[in-house]
Image (spheres, grey):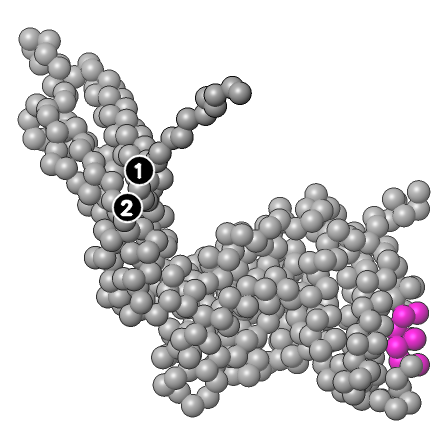
Amino acid sequence: MRESTKQVVSLPAATSQDILTNILRDGAQRMLAQAIDAEIAEWIETHRDVCDEAGHRQVVRNGRLPKRTILSGVGAIEVEQPRVLDRRPKDEAEFFSSKILPPYLRKTKSLEDLIPWLYLKGISTGDFSEALAALVGPSAAGLSASTIVRLKSVWEEEFQQWNKRSLEGKKYVYVWADGVHFNIRLEEDRLCILVFMGATEDGRKELIAVADGYRESEQSWKSLLLDVKARGLVVDPKLATGDGALGFWKALPQVYPSTREQRCWVHKTANVLDKLPKRLQPEAKDKIHQIWMAPTKVDADQAFDLFVATYDAKYPKATECLSKDRDVLLTFYDFPAEHWIHLRTTNPIESTFATVRLRHRRTKGNGSRLACLTMVFKLMQSAEKRWRLLNGAKLLPDVIQGVTFIDGIKPQEAAA
């Protein structure tokens, strides 16, 4: 028999510091050092013509600065930065400041982002040290719960500034509106957060406004809409999608009179099913689904009539709930079919608020109105980075020009 030539390679026993983490940290440390060296070399090269009377360069390297420790996502990285000396008189000398490694940087941006992310996702301030140590190692112990206390005041200031920013020149083709209620620990009444977001001319979704209101009342929505208009949002959106809250729909035409209405099918479905026995709800839900998923408005009307004929005799409240908004439930058929998935519901807001509600439940509510508004703002701002472009964004210029689509198809294409 042939003797086996396989060799057994023994790896070092795992220690408290993960081997892969050490490799990543060492690699990051070398890359950072190389990047800083290259940055300094470029700075010195751009000053190569700065010489004294004897022809000696005035901007040169001069040893190294004391070592610094930077906290990163892979643990602590030790950095030793070269020192740059400018020999010219003080009034002529230029101070070199690294853009890669600013003088007072002690933690990377990824770690700075991690801290608010942990808090906003439901980690209590008391558990911060343990959570950070598990994620980035024991070196993060200095980032304690007190960091969050300081961050909260920073976030509140950010929200106040954002809520006053100029909207001059902004144009939103579509907008979505919704109101969500939260408990405030230090107040008796529940807080209603009004959220207004839109899709720009190039199809990007953006958060427009976040405000507190009184039970989604007409006055609360009117105040929000007038505020964004006063800050520069003067062009009427082409379509607004929202639930059946009467406050928004009463306020909208007073501020943006030409904006068309589209009621949210998710909210409407829930309201209709609530007026039917549970045993009938699965079947009724399927019939409602056949309405708003119909390929043409004619098909939708037929499915609509079938639903009413099926349940009107015994459950008139359910059919009335659906029928009273018939026209504004089917507005989307006048817009590109590629956009229907975005226009039929307020999901762009609802899906984001799933995270907000989770954080709110874990912390048993916010302590103040401003804290709640700030939390909603920061979480939606974080979610905004992941909002995807509208399907069929190339069709938005046609919508802006006022083209009415026929069952989602552009008129000349439908005729062809």
Viewer-proximal residue among 393 and 383: 383
Q: Residue furthest top?
A: 54
Viewer-proximal residue among 173 and 3: 3
Residue appearing at x 82%, y 82% in the figure:
280
Q: Amino acid at mark 2?
A: Thr
**Does residue 381 appear to the left or right of 286 in the view shown?**
left
Which x, y percent locates residue 276? Answer: 79, 86
Q: Residue furthest front?
A: 1
Residue appearing at x 26%, y 66% in the figure:
145
**Does residue 45 appear to the left or right of 74 in the view shown?**
left
| Alpha carbons under labels 1 and 2: distance apart | 9 Å
> Which residue position is annotated with label 2?
15
Name the dominant secondary structure of the magenta segment: helix
Quadrant of res 270: bottom right
Does the rendering let one see residue 324? no
Residue appearing at x 14%, y 37% in the figure:
67
Quadrant of res 98: top left
Q: Which mark is residue 300?
A: none
* Other-residue count near label 1 (Cα within 10 Å), few / some / many at <14 / 14–19 / ≥20: few
As for residue 330 lying within the magenta part, the answer is no
As for residue 308 lying within the magenta part, the answer is yes
Viewer-proximal residue among 39 and 90: 39
Q: Is residue 310 above or below residue 122?
A: below
Quadrant of res 38: top left
Q: Amino acid at mark 1?
A: Pro
> Which residue position is annotated with label 1?
12
Residue range of the region highlighted in magenta in the rendering: 302-309
* Badge 2 element: loop
Does the rendering let one see residue 387? yes
Which x, y percent locates residue 254? Answer: 63, 73
